[in-house]
Amino acid sequence: MELLQQEWLLQQQRRNEMENHSLAIKLLALLCFLWLSRTAPSPYFLAASSLLFWLLDAIWKAEQARVTQRLLQLEQALRGEGAVTGMQFQSDWAQSRGGIVALLGEYVRAGSKPTVALLYVLLILAAVARFVVQV
């Protein structure tokens, strides 16, 4: 039981740090967009950089979702409702990991959540609006 509690504390801390890093990615995306909107020669570059940050954030949030899933398993085991071996996050994930299509699906699901997608959709729309104004 003690291993489960230790792992829960570690995973919860990790999840919180990942949330902070996701917010940092969003802030960096916004700052880069504002800088590039002044210096970039093409609105396509603005949209492409926003897509790149969106992908990075989606990958990060997919990893956070794995940590969240593990936290839920640990909480269930701590309540005595399931059997989980502590300190086996990577081993458990490696056993359940799908192929490349499954990983891409995780990234798409993570990136399509409103809390992830909203900023990037707005940035891409702003890049498109800039293109329309230039034409």
Image (cartoon, grey):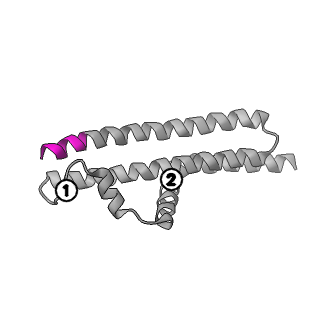
Our reading of the magenta stretch's main secondary structure is: helix
Estimate the x, y position of residue 117 in percent, counting from the top left. 55, 51
Query: Which region of the structure is painted magenta?
Result: 1-9
Q: Is residue 115 left or right of residue 76?
A: right
Residue 73 is marked as: none
User: Would residue 60 be counted in the magenta stretch?
Assistant: no
Q: Residue at x 58, y 49 (%)?
A: 54
CA separation in Å, label 1 and label 2: 32 Å
Numbered disc in front, either 1 or 2: 1
Q: Is residue 122 visible?
A: no
* Residue with the mark numbered 1: 84
SS label for mark 2: helix
Q: Is residue 92 above or below residue 1?
A: below
User: What amino acid is found at the position of numbered circle 2 in the picture?
Assistant: Pro
Q: Position of residue 107 (x, y in %)?
A: 50, 57
Residue 45: give x, y in percent of width and height. 75, 45
117 up-or-down from 108: above or below: above
Q: How many marks?
A: 2
Of mark 1 and mark 2, the one earlier in the sequence is 1
Q: The disc labelled 1 sits on which kind of residue?
A: Val
Residue drawn 80% across the image and 49% down it: 131
Q: Which numbered dot is residue 114?
A: 2
